[in-house]
């Protein structure tokens, strides 16, 4: 008899316990969020509001740390001991050592238990990574084997579309991802960069929008929904935001309702892993191509 197949992911996917349950995703390993000399488990022990408060108090951006191979060993062992095969959807290996660490743990688990553990490099993060995890969970529900799910999930990476809008440059500058001079110029000109991650995990900034927060968010929605007209698989769109005022959240929902083409809208409040890089008012609308 074949082993039961479960799907796992990490908090870089911006999923939450409620969405894990809804889509039959077994578990989510939390990245470490370091604030000063204290370390917290993303999503479970700290939320974006906590790190924004820390930033306001200290003017320092919290640091993220990938899970170690031992973290993954403990994480996978819970399910391997139950005789489950595991397909793990990992954050982009270009940004993080999490994928490499999960592979090391998977190899050891495969030797210790009579199960198969596959780790899939999503080459992305946030809502696009969530797309992959949800699709993998749907395949598991249909009774596919772990190896087939891992192969098909890896093939789906080429259909993931990852474009997100940073809420500003302050967190990028404080975190060392751009210079303070660049951030000052962007803030002075009210420029907000849109970031794109390609199918090899490489990040670029192909566009910048100018204006108030609400204005640039609408420009971003115009851009993404125009892409959706050309390329989208309309079965699902995943939207996420961090630290936004209610009127901006309402505007995002209104834009999607008026667009009206997606069969399902999955709404995420980003986890700390995303928030540490983008800061407040970071948003995304992510879909898969046809």
Image (cartoon, grey):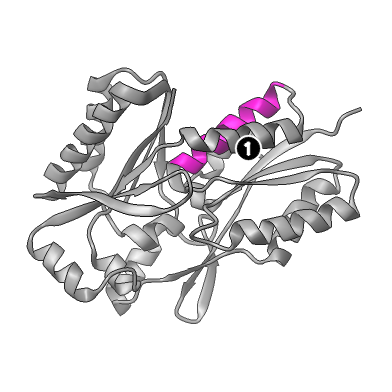
Residue 25 is situated, as x and y percent measured from the top left of the image, at 63, 37
Task: Report x, y in % for residue 258.
Answer: 22, 21
Left or right: 260 as drawn, with respect to 182: right
Report the magenta stretch's main SS. Answer: helix
Q: Is residue 66 magenta?
A: no
Q: Is residue 14 left or right of residue 171?
A: right
Residue 90 placement, left or right of 179: right
Q: Measuring 19% from the left and 68% from the top, which residue is drawn there?
A: 183
- Depicted 120 relative to depicted 98: above or below: above
Say few, some or many: other residues with alpha carbon within 10 Å of mark 1 (under 14 / 14 to 19 / 20 or more).
many
Q: Is residue 191 above or below residue 161?
A: below
Could you say which quadrant of the image residue 154 lies in? top right
Label 1, secondary structure: give it. loop
Q: Position of residue 252 (x, y in %)?
A: 25, 35
Residue 21 seen in render: no
Q: Nearer the viewer, residue 202 or 90?
A: 202
Q: Judge from the rendering whether residue 145 lies leftward or rightward of residue 191; answer left or right.
A: right
When the figure is inspected, residue 169 is found, relative to residue 109, above or below; the finding is below
Name the quadrant containing residue 102. Answer: bottom right
The residue sitting at the bottom extreme is 37
Q: Is residue 102 visible?
A: yes
Q: Which residues are magenta?
A: 128-142
Instruction: State which quarter of the image contains the C terminus.
Output: top left
Q: Residue at x 41, y 41 (%)?
A: 268
Q: Nearer the viewer, residue 253 or 129?
A: 129
Residue 227 position (above or below residue 218): above
Query: Label 1: which residue?
Result: 25
Image x and y of residue 79, in percent: 78, 46
């Amino acid at each position: 008899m074949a082993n039961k197949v479960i799907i796992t992911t990490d908090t870089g996917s911006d999923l939450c316990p409620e969405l894990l349950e809804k889509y039959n995703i077994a578990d989510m390993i939390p990245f470490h969020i370091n604030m000063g000399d204290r370390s917290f488990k993303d999503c479970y022990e700290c939320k974006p509001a906590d790190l924004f408060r820390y930033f306001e108090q200290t003017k320092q951006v919290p640091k993220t740390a990938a899970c170690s191979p031992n973290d993954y060993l403990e994480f996978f062992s819970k399910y391997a001991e139950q005789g489950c095969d595991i397909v793990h959807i990992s954050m982009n290996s270009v940004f993080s050592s999490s994928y490499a660490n999960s592979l090391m743990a998977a190899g050891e688990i495969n030797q210790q238990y009579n199960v198969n553990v596959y780790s899939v490099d999503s080459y992305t993060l946030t809502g696009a990574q969530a797309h992959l995890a949800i699709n993998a969970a749907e395949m598991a529900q249909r009774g596919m084997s772990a190896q087939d799910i891992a192969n098909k999930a890896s093939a789906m990476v080429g259909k993931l579309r990852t474009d997100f809008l940073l809420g500003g440059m302050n967190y990028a500058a404080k975190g060392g991802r751009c210079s303070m001079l660049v951030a000052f110029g962007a803030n002075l000109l009210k420029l907000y960069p849109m970031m794109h991650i390609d199918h090899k995990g490489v990040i670029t900034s192909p566009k910048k929008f100018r204006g108030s927060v609400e204005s640039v968010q609408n420009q971003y929605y115009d851009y993404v929904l125009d892409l959706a007209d050309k390329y989208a698989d309309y079965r699902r769109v995943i939207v996420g935001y961090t630290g936004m005022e209610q009127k901006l959240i309402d505007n995002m929902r209104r834009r999607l309702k008026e667009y009206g083409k997606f069969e399902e809208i999955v709404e995420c409040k980003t986890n700390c892993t995303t928030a540490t890089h983008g800061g407040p008012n970071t948003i995304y609308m992510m879909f898969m191509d046809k």
